[in-house]
């Protein structure tokens, strides 16, 4: 088989997180086959780290941590009041540095595991799919400490499975229920609704229809949103304050569920408790509008802001033919001729660009600096600006390119002296490096400056 290093480099940038030293040569004989093979690897997309807490365990631990801190603060105020007439100045040198708060500790551990998965992948196609679907079904770490565990439990487990399973796992996860306020939604005519004079919160039902499945302008009505919200009443989680063993885990609360059958998108769903919501989600996952919505988003993310209609149609058909098998849809994506256009038309999102820089240099990255850089560049980890997630349009990231120069410059000053710019360029770009980029890097006055210019090169910024 003829070696094609240029297509190999393109594959690594477009479908992965950029090359590491040696990876262009490793897949040059069959770049497309290498992408397909990564989809078949055992446990692809999974993170096996026993030190990471489950979502429920994280929620319970943080609840206990905050309760203990509140008690300690109250104890300090009480003790201070009791000893107000005594000299209680602390002896010199007795102050201790503040430990990292537990919520931040959990966040850093999850972020480190996620970054390591991207840096350690041979190509990173499956990891890119994880990031894509995590953004599609986004939650917010400002709302819940479970964001990292959510990604592992709802997204990674199903990233190469069926959309119906991922949809159910995502919408029923406590992180999603908290983010979209379904824990506050109570059927108006349910036992709890009548006793507490509480009512619906339509956020989850609306976003599932508009963002997660059918997409906007696909024929559903406000009545569908309201009825679907009624279907989802009772989907909540056990409170850690009253359940130290299972607090933070999903529970269906029948007394909060709106009684009766509901009509959603033309289908009637009898009241089967939690099964009513599962039935609606199962039908939405298999809807033709969902197939097209997913096909458009995947094509826009990986290929072009204006998705080629032929690719969208091919992916939608494959989705429908395989009952929403996401592995088969991914295969259809990478075997589409349009996916291999030589023009690098998509700007890498900040997290992708940072991962590419670390892979190119072999640096592990300080997770705090990485997170600070992502935030500065407008893509704070697990903190989307809205339930729609971060944009996949180039226009959303153009204004941040100037800030990337500052990040690249700081990174190169710290790490650049230890790297040969020519070697990094061959590893990171190889045949994609233009004559202009080679000239600019060669004329640099120092290794750090050369590395900065390389990381800012158009062919490194784009995929």
Image (cartoon, grey):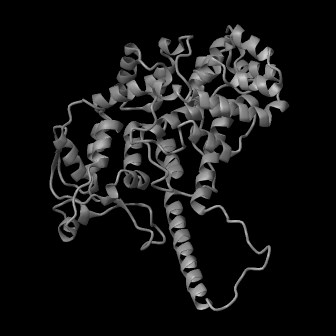
On the picture, is 238 further left or further right than 60? left
Can you tell which quarter of the image residue 10 is in?
A: top right
In the image, residue 405 lies at what x, y percent? Answer: 66, 28
**Number of marks in picture:** 0
Q: Is residue 160 visible?
A: yes
Provide residue 200's location: percent of width, then percent of height: 23, 56
Does residue 362 appear to the left or right of 162 in the view shown?
Answer: right
Q: Position of residue 274 (x, y in %)?
A: 28, 55
Please indicate, yes or no, whether residue 23 appears anywhere in the rendered image. Answer: no
| Residue nearest the observer in this picture, 185 or 124 | 185
Of 356 and 76, nearer the camera is: 76
Give the vertical position of 50 relative to 111 (above or below). below
User: Which is more toward the observer, 1 or 400?
Assistant: 400
In front of the other: 200 or 380: 380
Q: Who's the residue at 21% across and 59% down the image?
A: 199
Left or right relative to 204: residue 390? right
Q: What residue appears at the point 17 percent right and 67 percent down from the top-left corner?
A: 194
Place of residue 419 in the rendered image (x, y in percent of width and height, measured from the top left): 82, 28
Quadrant where the C terminus is found in the figure? top right
Using residue 422 as the reference point, say whether residue 197 is left or right of it: left
Q: Residue at x 51, y 56 (%)?
A: 145
Above or below — where is 299 with respect to 364?
A: above
* Quarter placement of the N terminus: top right
């Amino acid at each position: 088989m003829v070696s094609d290093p240029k297509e190999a480099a393109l594959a690594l940038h477009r479908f992965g997180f950029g090359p590491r030293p040696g990876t262009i040569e490793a897949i040059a004989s069959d770049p497309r086959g290498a992408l397909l093979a990564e989809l078949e690897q055992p446990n692809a997309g999974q993170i096996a780290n026993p030190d990471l807490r489950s979502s429920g365990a994280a929620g319970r631990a943080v609840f206990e941590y905050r309760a203990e801190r509140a008690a300690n603060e109250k104890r300090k105020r009480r003790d201070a009041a009791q000893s107000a007439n005594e000299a209680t100045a602390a002896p010199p040198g007795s102050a201790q540095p503040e430990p990292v708060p537990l919520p931040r500790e959990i966040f850093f551990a999850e972020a480190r595991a996620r970054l390591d998965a991207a840096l350690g992948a041979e190509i990173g196609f499956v990891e890119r799919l994880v990031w894509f679907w995590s953004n599609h079904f986004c939650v917010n770490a400002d709302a819940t400490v479970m964001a990292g565990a959510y990604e592992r439990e709802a997204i990674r487990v199903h990233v190469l499975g069926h959309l119906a399973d991922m949809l159910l796992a995502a919408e029923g996860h406590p992180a999603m229920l908290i983010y979209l306020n379904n824990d506050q939604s109570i059927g108006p005519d349910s036992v709890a609704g009548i006793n507490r004079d509480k009512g619906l919160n339509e956020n989850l039902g609306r976003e599932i229809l508009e963002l997660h499945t059918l997409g906007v302008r696909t024929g559903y009505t406000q009545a569908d949103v309201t009825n679907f919200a009624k279907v989802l009443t009772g989907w909540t989680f056990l409170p850690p304050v009253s359940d130290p063993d299972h607090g933070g885990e999903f529970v269906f609360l029948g007394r909060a569920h709106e009684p009766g059958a509901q009509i959603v998108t033309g289908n009637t769903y009898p009241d089967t408790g939690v099964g009513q919501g599962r039935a609606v989600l199962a039908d939405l996952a298999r809807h033709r509008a969902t197939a097209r919505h997913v096909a458009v988003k995947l094509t826009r993310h990986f290929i072009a802001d204006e998705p080629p209609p032929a690719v969208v149609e091919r992916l939608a058909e494959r989705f429908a033919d395989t009952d929403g098998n996401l592995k088969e849809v991914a295969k259809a994506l990478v075997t589409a001729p349009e996916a291999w256009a030589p023009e690098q038309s998509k700007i890498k999102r900040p997290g992708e660009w940072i991962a590419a820089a670390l892979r190119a240099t072999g640096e592990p990255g300080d997770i705090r600096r990485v997170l600070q850089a992502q935030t500065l560049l407008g893509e704070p980890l697990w903190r989307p600006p809205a339930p729609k997630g971060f944009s996949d349009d180039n226009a959303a990231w153009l204004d941040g390119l100037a800030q990337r120069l500052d990040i690249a410059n700081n990174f190169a000053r710290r790490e650049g002296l230890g790297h040969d710019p020519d070697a990094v360029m061959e590893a990171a770009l190889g045949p994609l490096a233009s004559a202009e980029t080679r000239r600019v890097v060669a004329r640099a006055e120092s290794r750090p400056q050369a590395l900065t210019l390389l990381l800012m090169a158009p062919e490194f910024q784009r995929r």
